């Protein structure tokens, strides 16, 4: 399972990198519009997004009153895409990455605890490790098309 944990950590690092780049882009768009308007506010992190039919916006709350700054124009044909894009804003992606990393950390802690448990507690500790390992297999499923995904990680679902 160490290879699965390493695989998942690498995918989470990639997702974190993409989310931070998107936030930086949004922050850059906001800062550019602020400069054009003659404002030199502290930088906004660009993490919270919203949408209308054709556009994705970053919420700029630096001036006390939140306002929306357009960061993407998806065109009229893409109005079904903008809610999805806005829903997966960098803040949400980073929160999901954090939660998944916590699950990985919990699995590693449980493995250590099981290795160090006495015979009376071993069955419980071992069962917890197996349950967490099963959860990690499901966590890896969205990456099944990745070239480094191993089919042996696919969850074994029993009826």
Image: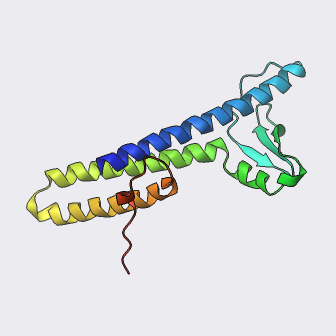
Picture layout, residue 81 above or below residue 37: below
* Residue 95 position within the rendered picture, expressed as x and y whole percent measured from the top left: 55, 46
Residue 70 vs residue 145, the one in the foreground = 145
* Residue 45 position within the rendered picture, expressed as x and y whole percent measured from the top left: 67, 32
x 84%, y 20%: residue: 35
Of all residues, the one furthest to the bottom in this rendering is: 159
* Residue 20 position within the rendered picture, expressed as x and y whole percent measured from the top left: 61, 34
* 30 on left or right of 120: right
Q: What color scheme is it?
A: rainbow
* 93 on left or right of 26: left
* 125 on left or right of 25: left
Image quadrant of residue 125?
A: bottom left
Residue 136 vs residue 115, the one in the foreground = 136
* Figure label count: 0
* Residue 42 position within the rendered picture, expressed as x and y whole percent measured from the top left: 72, 22
x 76%, y 31%: residue: 62
Quarter containing the C terminus: bottom left
Residue 147 vs residue 16, the one in the foreground = 147
x 27%, y 53%: residue: 110
Of all residues, the one furthest to the left in this rendering is: 119
Picture layout, residue 129 above or below residue 42: below
* 60 on left or right of 108: right
């Amino acid at each position: 399972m160490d290879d699965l944990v390493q695989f998942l950590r690498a995918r989470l690092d990639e997702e974190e990198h993409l989310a931070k780049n998107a936030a930086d882009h949004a922050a850059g768009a906001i800062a550019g519009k602020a400069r054009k308007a003659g404002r030199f506010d502290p930088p906004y992190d660009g993490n919270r997004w919203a949408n209308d039919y054709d556009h994705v916006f970053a919420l700029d709350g630096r001036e006390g009153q939140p306002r929306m700054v357009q960061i993407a124009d998806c065109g009229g044909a893409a109005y079904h895409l903008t809610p999805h894009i806005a829903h997966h804003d960098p803040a949400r992606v980073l929160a999901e990455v954090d939660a998944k990393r916590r699950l990985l950390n919990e699995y590693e802690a449980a493995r250590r605890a099981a290795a160090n448990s006495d015979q009376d507690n071993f069955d419980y500790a071992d069962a917890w490790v197996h349950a967490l390992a099963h959860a990690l297999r499901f966590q890896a499923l969205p990456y099944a098309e990745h070239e480094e995904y191993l089919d042996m990680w696919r969850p074994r679902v029993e009826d």
